[in-house]
Image: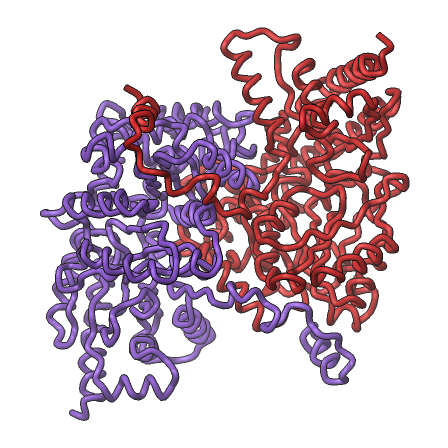
Chain colours: A red, B purple
Amino acid sequence: VTLRAKASAGRLDGKMREKTLTMDTLNPQVKAVEYAVRGPIVIKAGEIERYLEEGGTKPFSEVIKANIGDAHAMGQQPITFLRQVVALCTFPELMDSPSFPEDAKWRARRILQGCGGHSLGSYSASPGVECIRKDIAAYIEQRDEGVPSDWENIYLTTGASDGIMTILRLLVSGKDSSRTGVMIPIPQYPLYSAAISEMDAVQVNYYLDEDNCWALDINELHRAHQAAKQHCQPRVICIINPGNPTGQVQSKKCIEEVLHFAYEENLFVMSDEVYQDNVYAPDCQFHSFKKVLYEMGPEYFSSVELVSFHSTSKGYTGECGFRGGYMEVINMDPEVKAQLVKLLSVRLCPPLAGQAAMDVIVNPPQPEEHTFKQFHQEKSSVLGALAEKAKLTEQILNAVPGIKCNPVQGAMYAFPRIFIPPKAVEEAKALGMQPDMLYCLRLLEETGICVVPGSGFGQKDRTYHFRMTILPSIEKLNVLLGKVRDFHIRFLKEYSGLE
Amino acid sequence: VTLRAKASAGRLDGKMREKTLTMDTLNPQVKAVEYAVRGPIVIKAGEIERYLEEGGTKPFSEVIKANIGDAHAMGQQPITFLRQVVALCTFPELMDSPSFPEDAKWRARRILQGCGGHSLGSYSASPGVECIRKDIAAYIEQRDEGVPSDWENIYLTTGASDGIMTILRLLVSGKDSSRTGVMIPIPQYPLYSAAISEMDAVQVNYYLDEDNCWALDINELHRAHQAAKQHCQPRVICIINPGNPTGQVQSKKCIEEVLHFAYEENLFVMSDEVYQDNVYAPDCQFHSFKKVLYEMGPEYFSSVELVSFHSTSKGYTGECGFRGGYMEVINMDPEVKAQLVKLLSVRLCPPLAGQAAMDVIVNPPQPEEHTFKQFHQEKSSVLGALAEKAKLTEQILNAVPGIKCNPVQGAMYAFPRIFIPPKAVEEAKALGMQPDMLYCLRLLEETGICVVPGSGFGQKDRTYHFRMTILPSIEKLNVLLGKVRDFHIRFLKEYSGLE
């Protein structure tokens, strides 16, 4: 008799005690959380995968998961040097191996020197290993052309998500009309809306301008802020640059406007810059919020509270599984900082392998080092391919009638707008689902392609989108985009009554 | 001009805009969090360490951190086999190296087979890598002598702390008198009280019986539960077995009583079993809550909601930095389980290196494998030394007048009761601190030994304790205990006016 059968038996004979934790007693804030990137469509994709594995048949032979920015899962190879350093840290006996380069060995030795008992198995200080924090600060100074960075402002995190949740945890408080309002872009990466739900804060939407390459419009910030003040206290503004899911890269002028706005309205700025190395459009450049703040002068640079997030998961390394990341915290009240450290300490520390991986990203091989050539080749190859795929995706999608895709200037996603015929919209409504969910489910069922409906990220009413990653190999991406095109044309025909 | 000077200047000339996040606007639940294991005394210890490094002098040459269960930091060596497997997963080129054993290679290959793109750099499914979940279920079945374990009930976590926080997050809800009451042992591991504060739940204390080797007394559970029902809804009972900080190992009878109580009172059971491999007393044995529940019969086994937590950080591996762990979830409502998966998915997945380390712990070398001998030697050596240190600590402490230490039956800590003379209690009160905080600060200042005051874990009024780990090497532990003895005698003399 299986457990499940036993439990059912118990329930049937009426003797079962009631469960303590049910949908009725569950924390309602948990219930309110939504996370589309791993939501219903992805669960469905998993079911289809298992069905195929078990010999079932479909009009396709494999599911292509373009739902999540998971580079290695799509075949991207790890950066050799990064893995060498982490392997050396993990198994220091390899220091004696001639097949590991000295450049990697000295970095590993230095990291281990900073670890308790010289072991990756010790807890680090809660903000992270000191020498890694120093390397990160040095990296930021270099990136920002000399803008000072204090290593004591650097906190290692368990991926960027962990840092974002932690900072929001500090900021969110209040009840009723004094509840904390958190301004987020729409479309957004749904970690933000999920965190806001879980913490019972108020989500304050500012809409990106799709007609202007998803640019952030300062007038829209003012509108959203004014409206929100009626029912909550807007205290935070979150920016994702380069954008996820929207792929835009913000101009310096736009960043200045946002920072000025935050300064004027006393908003805490959370700047999600995990795609800072993922800029493809030749006319775009990554500007860090911190550097722009610095250039606005000491009045701004000494006062605006700003946290910037980075991660090992994106860029050219794509090391999602290591759960590495950091945040730089500027102008935080010193007493609050002590509270931040206390809060971090309850979770003890971020994973050490992730911290080591982060260290390689901020302290990569230099031109004078032996490992530079291979490292540089691997890095360029990943970023070059991504740039090519960004262009390819935009071009193929824009050639499809009823699809319009802004340029993928950066990050790892296309977020095309799709025309959904009124009949399909009605059908979806009758089924109690969003029209783009219907679209994506059909796409999955008919082609095996898994993308996420735009409704999971937020979008203007009566517009529909999906998010797809540009991570598959060029060959696979071509196939994928061809299938999307054919599907879309079929879908339009079917619901426009043209069949 | 440094950033700090700039900021101060700004503040002095009165032009500074106010900070958004201050102690006044900080989330009050964050403010309420306390976490003694990395609290003020540990911050002080860090300051003294830096002072010594910079050439300062003290009556001692080094700070000994006996405040936290951080085995490698205290010199414990990693288990070779575990590190080999993780290194192979990290840098699969090592599969070709003859210096790595086949036993490690096949495990690494199997883990990588379960990873997207066969890379540790991919996200795993949010509950963890499937084959690792299956290994864990098999391990539990073996540990519990055949009690069935379903791999779909296994969720990998980022250390046990993460799992505990996640489950509490599901359970905690309600306002005013319907607020969730969480029953925890006193003394407790302060993750529990910190989580309860952060989530604004109600901490319901049940006191362990110090006079009876810190046993859990069922009458005390009833008392605590009855009292709590007046002002909240007790919905969860947390048990730590073997005990942290108290080191007791629960008898089977006691576990039966707790489970019966949970059954009767409709409580969700959270069983923190991270020290399940750390049992030293010859007359003690680890009994899992799950196995005991099974033996109580199907009525119990099919109904009591139970989550058990385990970790890579303790046991004989001590791999804290890998942040590995798992939880087994029994009898959870299927709809709630889907909510759990959703909540986990927001954080994407636990670190893959930690998942791999967990896999080695549940799937260690078998007697027929070549690596068994070395593995077994290393494991026995760690556990043998811990048993010896547990005994040594108890003996030396009990020989000190004014200190009484229960046997360290398991886990990694002694939690001796210390007599603090009334004059010292008064002095502490005048300083606005707990008497055992005064004691521990003096101990740190005079001997360099860092232990955590009992008040950080909770204790009966007018009793005082400290927690120290038994992790230092035997040689160092002897020195440490000798210094504690000498300090305690001096302290008693000073405050009893006998000097």
Q: Nearer the viewer, residue B138 or B93?
A: B138
Say whether residue A215 is left or right of residue B270.
right
Classify residue A252 by image quadrant. Answer: bottom right
**Total number of numbered discs in the rendering:** 0
Q: Is residue B142 visible?
A: yes
Position of residue A292 measured from the top left corner of the image (x, y, whole percent) = 80, 60
Say whether residue B291 is left or right of residue B400.
right
Say whether residue A163 is left or right of residue B88.
right
Which quadrant of the rendered structure holds the N terminus of chain A?
Answer: top left
Q: What residue appears at the point 79 percent right and 50 percent down from the top-left corner?
A: A206
Task: Say if B357 sits above or below B162 in the image.
Answer: above
Q: Nearer the viewer, residue A155 or B298?
A: B298
Task: Say if B432 sits above or below A138 in the image.
Answer: below
Q: What residue appears at the point 82 percent right and 62 percent down from the top-left corner?
A: A261
Classify residue B412 by image quadrant. Answer: bottom left
Q: Nearer the viewer, residue A496 or B23?
A: A496
Task: Say if A334 sits above or below A1 in the image.
Answer: below
Position of residue B149 measured from the top left corner of the image (x, y, whole percent) = 31, 28
Q: Nearer the viewer, residue B273 or B365?
A: B273
Which quadrant of the rendered structure holds the C terminus of chain A?
Answer: top right
Q: Is residue A120 visible?
A: no
Q: What residue appears at the point 54 percent right and 29 percent down from the top-left corner?
A: B119
Position of residue B373 measured from the top left corner of the image (x, y, whole percent) = 23, 32
Q: What residue appears at the point 21 percent right and 45 percent down from the top-left corner?
A: B381
Task: Say if A123 sits above or below A91 in the image.
Answer: below
Position of residue A151 measured from the top left corner of the image (x, y, whole percent) = 61, 63
Say whether residue B361 is left or right of residue A424.
left
